Amino acid sequence: MNGAESLVHSLLKSDVTTCFSNPGTSEMHFVAALDRVPGMHCVLGLFEGVVTGAADGYARMAGKPAATLLHCGPGLANGLANLHNARRAATPVVNIVGDQATYHRPLDSPLTADTEGFARGVSGWVRTSMDVRTVGADAAAAVQASMMAPGQVATLILPSDTSWNDGGIVAGALPRLPTAPASPNQIEAAADALRRGGPGIVLLLGGIALHAEGLALAHRIQAATGCRVLAQGSNARMARGQGRLAIERVPYVVDAAVKAMEGTRHLILAGSRKPVTFFAYPNKPQTSIPDDAQIHILSRPEQDVVDSLARLADALGCPKVAAPDNGKRPEPGRGALTPEAVAATLGALMPDHAVIADESVSFGRGFFGATKAAPPHDWLNVTGGAIGGGMPMATGAAIGAPGRRVINLQADGSAMYTVQALWTQAREKLDITTVLLSNRKYQILLGELANVGANPGRTALDMMDIGNPDINWPALAGSLGVEAARTDTAEGFADLLAHSLKRPGPFLIELLI
C-alpha cells in the first residue's frame, strides 16, 4: 500500500467521505488511489476558490469536514480567500495539499513555494507528512484537529514521494476532543445581569447558538427576562422561519449599528465576540457598543454555548414557552425589483427546509424582515468578508444537505470571482437556484467611498462600474451548463423562482435591479 492509498483509507475511517478537488501533477497518486479505494465522493472544481468555498458550505450543513485536494503552494494560494471565510465561520475543513518530493524541494523548481507559510494564515493546524509511514496517522490527526470546537481549518501537506512510496499504514479515527463547558462564574455573571431586566440587556448569539436548539433556549430567556436577543452580523448558519425566534443581526453600516445598539447597558456574549466595525472610518467609532456598557461572557466560541444557554435558562428559572409565531407569510412582491419586493417573493415561495446561501451584499441587507415567516430554513453568510464565497458555498451546501433546495442570493460583482461554481453545479446536477442580483456595479464600494469621506471623480467611479461591457449572465450560465433567464419585474421573478423550485438541477435567475 502506498502513502496515497493509506491517506484515502484513513480519511474514510474518520468519516471524511467527500473530497472537493482541483488536482495537479503532485497529487496524481492520490487521484489514482481514489479508483482503487471506493467510498469517496469526488467533486471537481475548475478553480481552487470554488473547491475551498464548497468545502466550507458542505461542512456547515453536513456537520463534518470534507477534504480538499489542492495543487502545491500556488493551488492553496488560489483557495485562500474562501479558507479565510471558513476560518471566520469556524468551519471544519481538511486541506490535502500536494507538494514537491522531499528530495526535490532543495532544487527550488518553479512550483516550489512556502506552502506551510501560505497555510498558517487560515489554518488552526498545519503538518507536512515527511514519511510514508505517518501519512495515515497524520490524516486522522488532521480530521480530529478540524473538529476541535468551534471548528477550524486543518492543512496536511503531502510531498509527492510520501504519496507514491510503499509502506503506508491505515489509521483509525481519533476520538473527538471534548468541548469545554463554561465555568459556573460565567453562568452566574450572565444571570445576574439578566435579573436586572429590561431592553438595555442584550444577549448576542454566535456559532451554534444560532441553530434551532440554541434559538429555542434564547427564546425562553427572552420571554422570562425581557432582554433583547441579537445575532452577530455574519454567521455560519442560522435557523430561521416559522417556529424559530426571529432575531436581527448587528448591522454592517456603522451608523446603523450604533443606532441598533444604542442604550445597551449589559452585553452578554453567547458564542459571539464583541461587535467591531468591518473597517476604521475617519471620525467614526470602531464598535457599536456604548462605551459605558458592561460586557459579560456567557460562553466563548470554543466553549459549549448550547449547554451554557441551557444552564443559564435553568439558573433563571425560565419556564418552557410555545414556539414563536412569526406572523403571516408574505405575498409575492409586485412591480419594481426593490429589496422589499425580492425579499417578499423569497419569503412567499421558499420551500420547506431550504438553505439560503447569502452573498447579496448591499442589496440584501433588508431581506430578514420579509423572510421570518417563511417555512423553516437555514441561512448561511459569507462570514469573512472575502467576496466570491456565495456560489461555492451554495455548491457545497447542496452536497452536504441532499434533498434540500439551496437558494443562492448572489451579487453580480462577487459572482464573477468564482463563476466556475456553476459548472460544478451542472456536473453534479445540484438543486440550486441562483438569484443573481445584477446592478452592474460594485454598489458596496460606492458606499465605502462615502464612509471614508472621499469625493470620487470619473476615474474612481469607473472602478466601481462592471457594466462596460454588460455581462450576459444567461449566456454565461448556459455556457457552463446551467439554464438561466432574466427579468426586471417582481412578477417575473416570482414566475421564474416558482419554475426553478419545481425542476431538478441548477437554475440561474438574473434580476436587473
Image: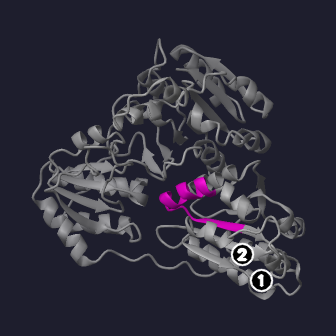
Q: Which residue is mark 2?
A: 13
Give the x, y percent position of residue 331: 43, 20
Q: Answer yes or no: do the residues labelled 2 and 1 have beta carbons within 8 Å? A: yes
Q: Nearer the viewer, residue 149 or 108?
A: 108
Q: Which residue is mark 1?
A: 170
Q: Residue at x 52, y 20 (%)?
A: 513
Q: Residue at x 21, y 62 (%)?
A: 295
Q: Nearer the viewer, residue 22 or 492?
A: 22
Magenta part of the protein: which range?
80-96
Left or right of residue 474, residue 305 in this image: left
Q: How does the figure colour the protein chain or chains?
A: one colour
Give the x, y percent position of residue 279: 38, 48
Image mark for residue 222: none
| Residue 189 inside the magenta-drawn segment | no
Q: Is residue 366 above or below residue 195?
A: above
Residue 72 visible? The answer is yes
Quadrant assignment, res 338: top left
Please tell me whether mark 2 or mark 1 is closer to you in this view.
Answer: 1
Residue 374 visible? The answer is no
Q: Is residue 181 above or below residue 318?
A: below
Quadrant assignment, res 423: top right
Where is the N terminus found, in terms of image quarters?
bottom right
Q: Residue at x 72, y 34 (%)?
A: 504
Left or right of residue 282, residue 365 in this image: right
| Residue 94 inside the magenta-drawn segment | yes
Task: State the SS at label 2.
Answer: helix
Task: State the SS at label 1.
Answer: loop
Q: Residue at x 49, y 18 (%)?
A: 337
Quadrant assignment, res 405: top right
For label 1, the crowd category at 10 Å Cα-Cα, with few meaning under 14, some 14 to 19 and many 20 or more, is: many
